[in-house]
Image (cartoon, rainbow, N blue to C red):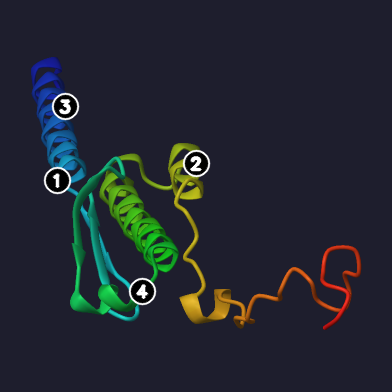
Amino acid sequence: MDTNAWLRDYQQDVQNRLARAEQVKEMVNTAIGTARSTDGAVLVTVGPTGALQDLQLSPKADGLTSTQLAQLILRTAREAHRKVADQVAQSVKPLIGDSEAMSFLESQIPPAEEPAAAQEQPSRPARPAWDDDNDDNGPILR
């Protein structure tokens, strides 16, 4: 192969790599992750950095306490973040292949969470401050 042919091939290879890198950059910049809570009360969309882009609450959210709603929003946002992180990783993979850099990137993807029902503990009614196990705070006659 002559020098001119080698140089043309090399320049074409560089141009192809640059074009692929530009495609990956565009895919990463436009990546979004969307997740809906299992009960449908919350819909969260995040951008490629995990920044919140949209939050929608359905009428089902009206029946939740503020604490329940906050927990549901956070859990749903984490799932949206996991989805966008996986999307970004898959976008980059063709460019960097199976490498240490790819392994590191994949290790940064948050694991999927257990469904909400598996995480919640059965609720118990609050005990009064003066229950039978606590003799120093309650009334003498019960």
The image shows residue 91 at horizontal and vertical percentages of 26, 49
Circles 3, 1 touching at the beta carbon (< 8 Å): no
Closer to the N terminus: mark 4 or mark 3?
Answer: 3
The image shows residue 124 at horizontal and vertical percentages of 64, 81
Closer to the N terminus: mark 2 or mark 4?
Answer: 4
Secondary element under disc 1, as helix, strand or loop, is loop
79 or 31: which is nearer to us?
79
Label 4: which residue?
Answer: 64
Label 1: which residue?
Answer: 30
53 or 97: which is nearer to us?
53
Could you give the CA–CA distance between mark 2 and mark 4, rounded to whole angstroms? Answer: 39 Å
What's the amino acid at mark 2? Phe
Up-down relation of residue 3 to residue 32 (above or below): above
Could you give the CA–CA distance between mark 4 and mark 1, rounded to whole angstroms? Answer: 33 Å
What's the amino acid at mark 3? Val
Label 2: which residue?
Answer: 104
Label 1 vs label 2, nearer the camera: 1
